[in-house]
Image (cartoon, rainbow, N blue to C red):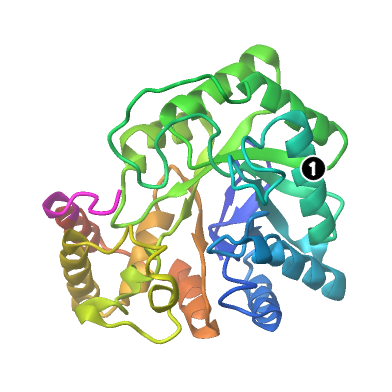
């Protein structure tokens, strides 16, 4: 396994991060236990979850993934071997603390206490804001329209709340998710000016089908030591090649919840995937592994969050750290990006 520092800390996190959002929906607790056992044995010490998991988010499965992880911690007594990241959701439906904004003092406190209880732990290593409260673009939304009603918690207030949790020993570090360059810059500016906790990471989508992170956020990540935690690195499985030629494998994410995961299903994406597949085939590599390795070697990236529903998938994903991408492969990948730039932003 390979490791990088988390932000400007001395904490070494694996460059493959174990994603968990299918546990409690597509995967059972036993599946989750098997994945956690294997991942830790392979040196994957960095795991990511969220209070709203499993996914697709529903009231009846809220918190299920954290509960499964907590049960594993309790069973194995290996909590100290894992760097666990979780997330408090942004504005949400009514079943989450009455809905609406979630980063105010009461809601974020209740959220953290709930996560700690389900995870059966006294602290969370990296606590992230899952998506912004303010009106901005995320989850692939384009066409920015500035409509700010100021109905969101001030960044300084959020950081002060998080500082309190750090002083209480309930969280160690903080991160953002689905954030913009303005948002990350503003948090960093306020942290420096007010001597408040510093954002160490940004969990945003990044894959061969969506390299928009490179445009504005990559430079900030490098200069400010707030690296990317890349989610959807395989574009919900499309970059494994399993959906090529209109295939729809049984019990796959698209077969189960295709209406929820629409962002990767378009004509240009399919054309780009076919070209990436040919690059992998030409070099006797798997499309899955070149897709993951290209992300891992980026200087602005801290870790690639993988999500597997089978042990075979998990093993393939983890083993991607061992392959090498030649200059020719990287050149071919970049040429395809020029032909079909970011087909799934």
Indicate the secondary structure of the residue bearing disc 1: helix
* Magenta stretch in the rendered image: 337-345
Q: Position of residue 221 (x, y in %)?
A: 47, 35
Q: Is residue 144 above or below residue 99?
A: above
Q: Is residue 101 left or right of residue 318?
A: right
* Residue at the (85%, 75%) spot, across then down: 75
Q: Position of residue 325 (x, y in %)?
A: 31, 64
Q: Is residue 340 located in the magenta-colored stretch of the structure?
A: yes
Q: Is residue 206 above or below residue 290?
A: above
The residue lying toward the viewer, choosing from 47 and 110, is 110
* Residue at the (53%, 63%) spot, across then down: 56
Q: Is residue 51 left or right of residue 151?
A: right
Q: Residues within 10 Å of mark 1 (few under 14, many from 20)?
A: some
Quarter of the image holding residue 120? bottom right
* Residue at the (39%, 51%) spot, across then down: 206
Residue bearing mark 1? 110
């Amino acid at each position: 396994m390979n490791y990088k520092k988390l932000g400007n800390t001395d904490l070494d996190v694996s460059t493959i991060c174990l994603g968990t959002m299918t546990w409690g929906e597509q995967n059972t607790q036993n599946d989750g236990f098997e994945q956690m056992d294997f991942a830790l044995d392979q040196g994957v010490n960095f795991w990511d979850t969220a209070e709203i998991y499993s996914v697709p988010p529903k009231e009846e499965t809220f918190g299920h993934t954290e509960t499964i992880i907590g049960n594993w911690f309790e069973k194995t007594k290996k909590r100290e071997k894992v760097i666990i990241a979780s997330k408090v959701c942004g504005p949400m439906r009514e079943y989450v603390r009455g809905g609406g904004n979630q980063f105010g003092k009461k809601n974020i406190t209740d959220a953290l206490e709930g996560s700690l209880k389900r995870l059966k732990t006294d602290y969370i290593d990296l606590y992230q804001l899952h998506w912004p409260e303010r009106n901005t673009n995320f989850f692939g939304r384009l066409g920015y329209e500035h409509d700010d009603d100021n109905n969101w918690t001030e960044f300084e207030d959020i950081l002060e709340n998080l500082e309190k949790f750090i002083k209480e020993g309930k969280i160690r570090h903080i991160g953002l998710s689905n954030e913009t360059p303005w948002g990350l810059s503003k948090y960093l500016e306020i942290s420096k000016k007010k001597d408040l906790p510093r954002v160490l990471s940004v969990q945003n989508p990044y894959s061969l089908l969506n390299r928009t992170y490179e445009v504005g956020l990559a430079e900030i990540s490098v200069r400010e030591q707030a690296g990317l935690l890349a989610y959807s690195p395989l574009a919900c499985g499309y970059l494994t090649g399993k959906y090529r030629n209109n295939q729809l494998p049984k019990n796959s994410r698209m077969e189960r919840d295709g209406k929820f995961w629409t962002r990767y299903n378009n004509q240009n994406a399919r054309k780009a995937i076919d070209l990436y597949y040919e690059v992998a085939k030409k070099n006797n590599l798997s499309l899955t592994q070149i897709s993951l390795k290209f992300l891992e070697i980026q200087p602005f990236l801290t870790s690639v969050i993988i999500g597997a529903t089978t042990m075979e998938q998990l093993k393939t994903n983890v083993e991607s750290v061992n392959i090498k991408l030649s200059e020719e492969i990287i050149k071919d990948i970049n040429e395809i990006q020029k032909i079909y730039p970011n087909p799934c932003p």
